[in-house]
Image: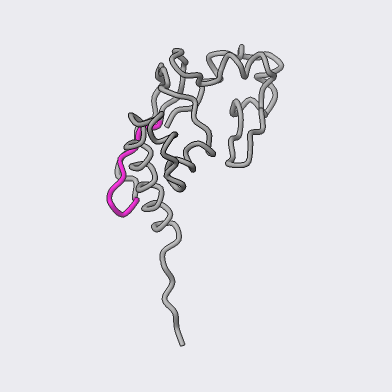
Amino acid sequence: MHIADVAQYVKEGSFLDQTPTTAAPAFTFPTGRIPMLPKRFRTHLSLNPKVDRLTITCEMDLNAGGAVTRYDLYESVISSDERMTYTAVRKILADCDPALRRRYAALVPRFELMAELMEAMRAKKDPPREHRL
């Protein structure tokens, strides 16, 4: 997982540095985004495809039960493959949209693995409850 490294773009002691909202460039939800920085910063920080960006990376290993067995946080430079939306990924995974699956064929196995990991993590977080009579 990567997030833009805001600290590399906001000068220490500046107004933006003193503003609590600089904790993240945006909060992203399936229903939309809430920007946390002015547009000129957001454009520069966005993890656009095929563009090198300074990021903070969290690399994790998970076991089959969805538990994190190892993690590492570090500064990195990434160049993402694509700019994906929640809608497109849902259509690929849940709706099995043939056109999108062809367009993103190289990424579909990664999305499917991420979906498996998400389900394992959800199951760990919310274990099935026993029904008692």
Furthest toward the front, the residue is 99
Query: Nearest the camera: 22 or 118?
Result: 118
Identify which residue is drawn at 34% across, 45% down.
68
Is residue 59 highlighted in magenta?
yes
Percent from the top left, x then y, of residue 48? 50, 19
Q: Quadrant of residue 56?
A: top left
- Answer left or right for 23 relative to 76: right
Percent from the top left, x then y, of residue 6? 56, 20
Identify which residue is drawn at 45% across, 61% down.
126
Query: Is residue 31 depicted above or below 45 in this figure?
Result: below
Query: Is residue 118 depicted above or below 54 in this figure?
Result: below
* The residue stretch that appears in magenta: 58-66
Q: Quadrant of the N terminus?
A: top left
Query: Nearest the camera: 48 or 56?
Result: 48
Percent from the top left, x then y, of residue 101? 39, 36
Query: Is residue 91 depicted above or below 122 in this figure?
Result: above
Is residue 84 highlighted in magenta?
no
Percent from the top left, x then y, of residue 82? 45, 24
- Answer left or right for 66 relative to 53: left
Q: How many marks?
A: 0
Query: Is residue 68 depicted above or below 26 in this figure?
Result: below
Query: Nearest the camera: 32 or 61?
Result: 32
- Answer left or right for 21 relative to 115: right
Query: Nearest the camera: 44 or 85?
Result: 85
Q: Quadrant of residue 44?
A: top right
